[in-house]
Every structure is written in structure tokens, then in C-alpha cells.
Image (tube, rainbow, N blue to C red):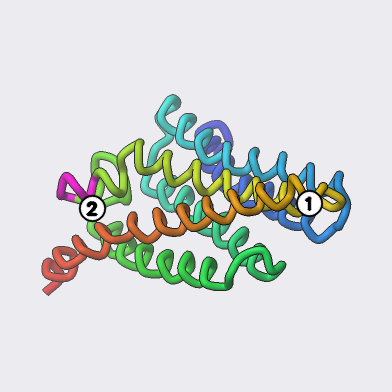
Amino acid sequence: MDIKNNTANIVSVSRIFVAFAAIGLLFIQTTNAYIWAVVLTIIAFSMDGVDGYIARKYNQSSEWGSVLDIMGDRIVEASYWIVFAVMGWLNILFPIICIARAFTTDGIRSVALSKGMTAFGDKSMQSTAWGKFICGSKFMRISYAVAKVAAFVLLIVAYIPDLDIKYADPIRLVAVILAWAAIIFCVVRAIPVVAESGKLFNDAK
């Protein structure tokens, strides 16, 4: 593999392992482990922006890169939701909704990809203004990312061993509110994908 011309793709895949390392640390019940989990979580989600920047700056954008980017998003996000539910920090509905949404949108997008369309960008499968705004606008993508990352980071912080309860409880409350905001964004951003999917299958008839 040509590493120089696949830097963005390497970053996309590498952040999955950074996230796995962070998640693994959550099962080590020490303050240092949780602090490192917070740091690695921030790094893992920051890398999502880095791969896109590299792809644009060095002209490494491609359909394969788009697939890897979305794959990385799905694996990382679902892994956190699942682990938080397993640890009893969030209701099991969170990972169920996240995974159901991922299967739905990615199934539809796989059909779009076979027709030369991508999830975002100039070849986006979204043809309506409202669909492009909800799925691809910087406002929606950044709002979703901020809510999600803040929820994940604050959840970990709230459960740091030996953290004083007077700090832990309010942090946990804010984290849960942000988690609900993130999962609502998750569902809302899937609506245009489903709503505009009919044209893909009509064309196939």
C-alpha cells in the first residue's frame, strides 16, 4: 500500500484502535486509567476531523476513503454506546437506536454508492436542500459531533473512581442530557437518507 497517498485512510482506521484502547481502560478501575481513557477518547474523535482535513488538503478524497470514514464513525460510536450500556451508565436503548440507525442508513448508502453517489460532498445522494442541510451541513455535523463527544467524555469523567459525588452527580446529569441530544441528532440525520432513498430503488426497476 502507498502510505504517502493513503494517509487519510490510515488515520480513519487508526482511530478505531485508539478508541478501543480508551474503552479497554474503562475496565481498569483506577483514576489514571480513566484519565487516559478521556485523553484517548478526545484523540480518537479529533482524528475524525484530521482524516478529512488530510484528504482535502492532499487530494486523497475517494469513494473508498468515504467508506472508511463512515465505517470508522460507526465502529467507534457504537462501541462507546454499547460499553456505556454494559457498564450501566446509559439505558440499553442508546446502542440499539445507534446500531439500528447505522444499518438502515448504511444499507441505503451502499445502494447509492453502487450508483456513483456518496454520503456527503459533490456526489451526495441527498438532492433536496433540507436533506443536504441535515446530513451534510457543517452546523448539523459539528453539533452532532460536539454533543456526542462531550457526552462520552463527561460520562467517563463522572465515573472516575474516587471522584467526589458532589462533582460526579452534576457531571453525570449533564452527560446524560448530552447523550440524549446526541442520539436525537443521530436519528434526525437519518431521516433525509430514508426519505430520499426511493429514487435509488425506482431507478433500479
* Point 42% across, 53% down: residue: 67
Give the magenta part as a residue range: 127-132
What amino acid is at disc 1? Ile
Identity of the residue furthest to the top in this view: 57
Answer whether residue 101 is magenta in the image: no
Q: Relative to 136, is 53 on the left or the right?
A: right
Q: Relative to 88, is 99 on the left or the right?
A: left
In the rendered image, residue 140, in percent from the top left (x then y), is placed at: 35, 43
Which image quadrant: the N terminus?
top right
* Point 42% across, 41% down: residue: 143
Disc 1 on helix, strand or loop?
helix
Please give the count of numbered marks on the rendered protein: 2
Tell me the residue that label 1 is attached to.
Answer: 165
In the rendered image, residue 37, in percent from the top left (x then y), is placed at: 74, 47
* Point 23% across, 53% down: residue: 125
What amino acid is at disc 2? Met
Disc 2 on helix, strand or loop?
loop
Q: Quadrant of residue 111?
A: bottom left
In the rendered image, residue 114, in percent from the top left (x then y), is placed at: 28, 60
